[in-house]
Amino acid sequence: MKTIYSAIQPSGIMTLGNYIGAVNNWQSMQANADNKCIFALADLHTITVRQKPEDLFNNSMSFYALLMAVGLDVKKSVIYMQSHVRQHSELAWLLNCYTYVGEMSRMTQFKDKSAKHSDNINMGLMDYPVLMAADILLYDADLVPVGYDQLQHIEITRDIALRVNNIYGDIFKVPEGFIPKVGAKIMSLQDPESKMSKSDPNPNAVISCLDAPEVIMKKFKRAVTDSDTVIAYDPENKAGISNLLRILAVAENKSVEQAEKECSGLRYGDLKVRVGESVVEMLRPFRSEYDRLIADKAYLLKCAKEGAEKASEIAEKTLKRFRDAIGFVPRQG
């Protein structure tokens, strides 16, 4: 049995890119009886950028409901909030002592976020990859589903794990990153050279999983394509059309090649309508279930508490193994 671990930050909205590139794949992994799945809301990571307390609370509750609405089952997977499991913070500190400043300063995401948030370049922003390493290593993860932009963080996680293992023996399982073949990177509808991002200031660039059907259709109709008339999957030369075909392939559960073949000969406007309609239908049951869940806060909190208890039980075994190897006096009681 393989252990699958992944997490998502509960900030802003859950975009179509989040859904296709990450959460939708989590559901298929959960369906595999050979997988033990652990999923988290990375709320500790979220506060590296200033959050309004009410927004952090509401977004965390909303994202927990979103994960369940998409089909993640608390009876089949461990689903919890990162800040509810103290072992994440403790292991992150320990791993800091086996991580070099130069490694962190070279992280691409640190450079990017420092440029975007120049008024708040905090240590948490630099230390983000170490906390992510703690997240993953606590659960002896075999596979970590990520987007391309997170591969560097998987590599530093592996480096830290190997460094510790070389000193103390077999402490951590060394994980592998996993990128799905379809829909790993969904691009902006207004700038198809850039990833669809929840922080994009242009609302027409991003599809929220909670957008109304008419809003989704309007955004797809406004999607940027090119001045050509040929529908072909060619990410280098036809980024906008290729992005639409990727989205269509996932929404209709087919390969990009199939989507390209079926849409060959359509006008661009017709392609946009077909993609929009397919996405609306894909998200319809998801939205209905979300509305039901978010109305029952007590149930969500109960599930989050039980998920954190399960996660903590697993995490404590790993943390104890490392603490004992370092030479700390064992905790009593």
Image: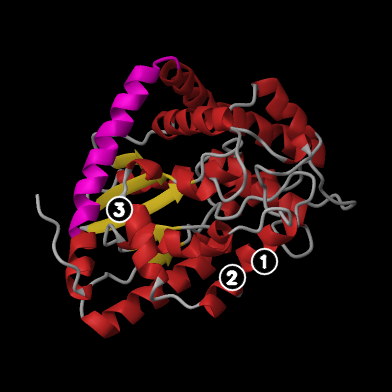
- Position of 214 with respect to 230 (left or right) is left
For the question of whether residue 269 can be seen, the reply is yes
- Position of 29 with respect to 147 (left or right) is left
- The numbered mark, 3 or 2, whose residue comes first in the sequence reads 3
- Residue at the image point whose x is 65% and y is 58% from the top: 121
Q: Is residue 11 above or below residue 5?
A: above
For the question of whether residue 267 can be seen, the reply is no
Tell how many labels: 3
Q: Which is nearer the eye, 112 or 180?
A: 112
- Which quadrant, please, contains the N terminus? bottom left
Q: Secondary structure at mark 3?
A: helix
**Residue 301 located within the stretch drawn in magenta:** yes
Magenta residues span 295-317
Q: CA separation, marks 3 and 2?
A: 24 Å
Q: CA separation, marks 1 and 3?
A: 27 Å
Q: Amino acid at mark 1?
A: Lys
- Residue at the image point whose x is 51% and y is 60% from the top: 128
Q: Amino acid at mark 2?
A: Met
Q: Amino acid at mark 3?
A: Gln
Q: Is residue 83 above or below residue 128?
A: above
Q: Position of residue 322 (x, y in %)?
A: 23, 68
Q: CA separation, marks 1 and 2?
A: 7 Å
Please name the residue that numbered disc 2 is placed on. 107
Please name the residue that numbered disc 3 is placed on. 87
Q: Residues within 10 Å of mark 3 (few under 14, many from 20)?
A: many
Q: Nearer the viewer, mark 1 or mark 3?
A: 3
Q: Residue furthest right?
A: 227
Q: Which is nearer the eye, 271 or 66?
A: 66
Q: Position of residue 330 (x, y in %)?
A: 13, 62
Q: Is residue 303 above or below residue 109?
A: above
